[in-house]
Image (cartoon, coloured by chain):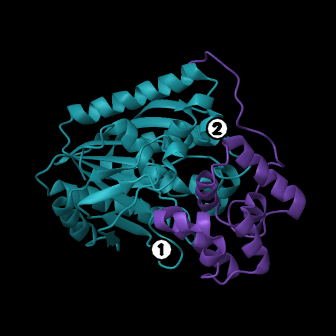
Amino acid sequence: MSLYQAQKILYHLNRDEEMQQTFLTDKAAVLSRYDLSTEEYEALHSGDIGLLYVLGVNGQILMHYAAFLKVEWFDYLQLMRDGVDNHGPVRAGIYAMTAGGEQFAETPVTSRDPN
Amino acid sequence: MSLVYAGILSHAPGITGRANLATNTLVRDAFYNCLEDQRNEIEASGAEVLVVVAAEHFANFFMDNMPAYCIGIGEKHYGPVEDAEWLKIPKTSIPGAPDLALKLAKQVMQRVDIAYSEEWKCDHGIMVPLHFLTPNFDMPVIPCNINCQGPPLTPLTRAWRFGEALRQACNDQAEKIAIVGTGGISHWPATPDSGKINEAWDREFLEQLMNQDKQKLLSYTDEDVYDQAGQGGFEIRTLIAAAAAAGGKGDLQFYSAELPIFAVGCTVARFEISSER
């Protein structure tokens, strides 16, 4: 049930610009409205993308949260890998890391026919 | 017959947000050109309204009340819900088509249980397609959502039936309507595996989709999709619905797995509009 609350706060935060402004100035006030475990509270308070990923926050919700925090793309991917390294495999949900931390997002230049 | 165009396209946020990080600029630009062609085809069809069958990512719905299907009947929609700088699409409002949307919703309800919404926030799942298909965001849009994010998910057979119901609802309308389905095929978005693409799986799926091979399309299980195509593969529901709405053979205009920075096999296709729906 607690993971549900951690995801719900991010769902609300991602789509509510007023809440975003409040969160930036007073995280504790926002976080106190949700029934969070200590681990979740601290991860949300510190913006720990890696731990939130491992806790099982839905990847799409987490991706939008990382964008809100202005985390650059490759840093965001690495933070998730670091989370797995530091805390173990993803504990819940459908966004587990399945390729052992391999990097897929670099691509060579090619002139192959795209079809 | 008021359905004048049916097609599919990708919607991954990297398509706009990480365009500058694509090293394979030849393929990237070929993809963008195909999306421009798709816009031109929709305009040439005379379509007055664009129905977008999408797979949103928690812009409107959460696990406290998650509809399997929802149609947006509001006068306006807003997006992107995400950081605009990240997506590289400015926040804007998009005109809806409330009268037509309500008529479509009522008729679809005769065959499929749906929810409706008068407030709709668009995430990249709709904003990226609109960025290319109506770049001034001035074409009336009816957003539809199929839950592809929060399991349990609607069965593929129901997604097909939703597409058919949408088509049958369109048949009774005076307005000229375009439908696009937008979702990924195999991909592992929002994970460290982002950029992984199972091209062989994609091409097999697309062949079945273009051939309207209903039996094969509806035989995929979520377990197999998750194993071979990732959690992003659950979005095939939107593509299946678009095929079902069209009823005719497809023409794959673009597919490439060579843009992993976009984190999806980039796809553009059109369908013939069958008169038998």
Please name the residue shown 74% across and 49% down the image. Answer: B192
Crowd class of label 1 (few under 14; some 14 to 19; many from 20; radius 10 Å): some
Q: Nearer the viewer, residue B100 or A51?
A: A51
Q: CA distance from mark 2 to mark 1?
A: 32 Å
Judging from the image, what is the letter of the chain drawn in purple?
A
Residue farthest left in this picture: B174
* Residue A114 appears in the figure: no
Residue A92: image quadrant is bottom right
Amino acid type assigned to the residue bearing label 2 in the image: Ala
* Residue of label 2: B200
Q: Chain of mark 2?
A: B
Q: Nearer the viewer, residue A104 or B169?
A: A104
The answer to whether residue A83 is left or right of residue B250 is right
Amino acid type assigned to the residue bearing label 1 in the image: Met
Q: Earlier in the sequence, mark 2 or mark 1?
A: 1
Judging from the image, what is the letter of the chain drawn in cyan?
B
Q: How many numbered circles are shown?
A: 2
Task: Locate residue A79, reporting x and y percent.
Answer: 77, 52
Q: Are marks 2 and 1 in contact (CB under 8 Å)?
A: no
